[in-house]
Image: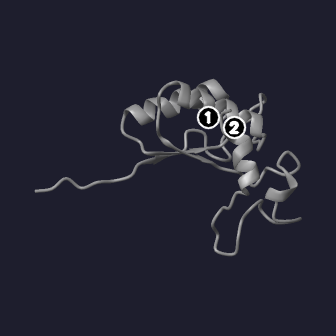
Amino acid sequence: MSKRKVIVTIAPTGGMAHKSQNPYLPTQPDEIAEDVVRCCNAGASVAAIHARRPDDGATCNADIYRDINTRIRAAGCDIVINNSRAAACTATWCASCRAGAGKSPGRSASRAWTQAPKCVRWMQPR
């Protein structure tokens, strides 16, 4: 009998949860990266990353994403990284990534998230 192959995707922080709801929630770059590396070592294939500000609020700050991504790669983890953008992201994201006033950033009619290449490059380790 052949083994069934699966892809495990993790989202260690999620888009809306806060440390006040669960003190174990990873919200800072070191915590998020550590959690992703542990999950990768346990067999996860994809990590949906939701970056947070130092006050634990959602952000789309490319420098914070870059910090998280760099930490993950420095640990030797080759997991697929999906730098997710929560609906809370507005002015902190580059204008070319926003779909327009009143809409979730980058969200298309098909309900898929899109990311402009310029913004993806800003988030990657240098």
Contact between marks 1 and 2 (CB within 8 A): the answer is: yes
Numbered tag placed on residue 65 in the rendering: 2
For the image, the number of numbered tags is 2
Q: Is residue 27 visible?
A: no
Q: Residues within 10 Å of mark 2 (few under 14, many from 20)?
A: many
Q: Amino acid at mark 1?
A: Asn
Percent position of residue 111, x then y: 64, 69
Give the image quarter of residue 32: top right
**Farthest residue in the front direction?**
126
Q: Amino acid at mark 2?
A: Tyr
Marks 1 and 2, how far apart at CA: 6 Å
Which residue is painted at 66% across and 28% down in the image? Answer: 29
**Above or below, comparing residue 28 to residue 113 in the picture:** above
92 or 52, which lies in front?
A: 92
123 or 1, which lies in front?
A: 123
Q: Residues within 10 Å of mark 1 (few under 14, many from 20)?
A: many
Q: Say what secondary structure mark 1 lies in.
A: helix
Numbered tag placed on residue 91 in the rendering: none
Percent position of residue 36, x then y: 51, 34
Which of the image's four quarters has the C terminus? top right
The type of colouring in the image is one colour
Q: Is residue 76 left or right of residue 19?
A: left
**Farthest residue in the left direction?**
1
Which residue is painted at 68% across and 61% down in the image? Answer: 114
**Above or below, comparing residue 44 to residue 67 in the picture:** below
**Above or below, comparing residue 71 to residue 81 in the picture:** above
Which residue is painted at 15% across and 56% down in the image? Answer: 2
Residue that numbered label 1 is attached to: 69
Q: Say what secondary structure mark 2 lies in.
A: helix
